Image (cartoon, rainbow, N blue to C red):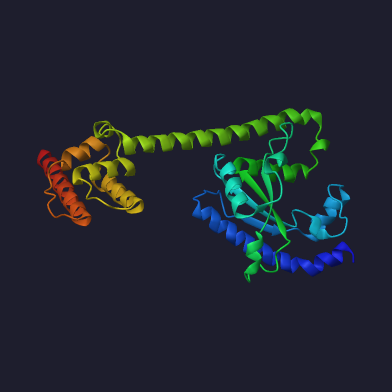
Amino acid sequence: MTFEKEYSTIIDDYKDFLNEFKRIIEKILVRHNIPTAFGIYGRAKTLDSINEKIMSDRFEIKKSVTELNDLVGIRIVLLFPEFKEKVVEILSKEFKLLNDPYKSIQSPDKFGYSSIHLIIAIKDEWTKTPDWENHKNKKAEIQIRTLSEHIWAETSHSLFYKREENIPNILNRDLFRLSALLEVVDEKLQNLKDKIEEHFNFILEAPYEEILNQDLNSETFKRVMLQNSKGIYSLNDYKNKVLSSKIEKDYNILNVKFLDNLIANKIDLTDLDSDTYIRKVIEILDADKLNYDNKIEEKI
């Protein structure tokens, strides 16, 4: 049987494998709070792509087209470099890892393409379930990239179609500069994320007196409300963000000290729940706004 004929007999089963595989990986990433740049991409290799790989001497089929590690492929594009190793660790535990993913990273003299490639298969116990019983010996390639690496990989593929050796030397300098620039983008994004997390940790842990000097945002607003309610305030992060934005917009309160001065020791907390406390805070803000508006009218 020719590999073309074999391909036509197995591809539908491999597409089913791909759909199940992609669905599981999406759930795994959500469960572990891994931020991706966009949805996970999956594809079954086309016959034309297989022929191109063979004709270019990048692969030789010995007995079966299923020897290809990337007959089924999935791409995960991450927002931040720090999550690459975490994803490798998670997927290595969830599936059978068939390669050393770090040996597949391109060498530094290649133009910035440093995706991590995992070759994985399902664990044997999975094949006892109806969704996986036909997929025991199948494997898939998973590419893990940052957004900057993805930009480079897609752009370079379009420009060179995997023929970097044919690039004139005169262009190499520009290519290396572009590659370095994309690496800097990854580094800066990671640094910015780290600084933001450091700032939010400061807001959570700093003495309250230091919080008073901060601008009002959802995190500092939460500290003010918790401090002045003695822990009664209990909105989740989303509702807290909505409420803090409303107070900034409707009452033009932009710093922590101003809000704290308005509400500190102004509310009897006896037998209050969170909703009642919030309502009383709003009443104080409404009264202050009305008083301010009246003073403006008197001046006019």
Residue closest to the eye, 48 or 25: 25
Q: Most extreme residue toward the right, as rendered?
A: 1
Residue drawn at (70%, 43%) of the image: 100
Q: Most extreme residue toward the bottom, as rendered?
A: 130
Pinpoint residue 4: horizontal percent, then vertical percent: 86, 64
Q: Quadrant of residue 169?
A: top right
Residue drawn at (70%, 56%) of the image: 140
Residue closest to the eye, 224 or 142: 142
Q: Is residue 41 above or below residue 173?
A: below
Pinpoint residue 73: horizontal percent, then vertical percent: 70, 55
Pinpoint residue 227: horizontal percent, then vertical percent: 22, 42
Whether residue 217 is visible, yes or no, is no
Q: Quadrant of residue 122?
A: bottom right
Residue closest to the eye, 129 or 222: 129
Numbered-mark total: 0
Pinpoint residue 249: horizontal percent, then vertical percent: 28, 46
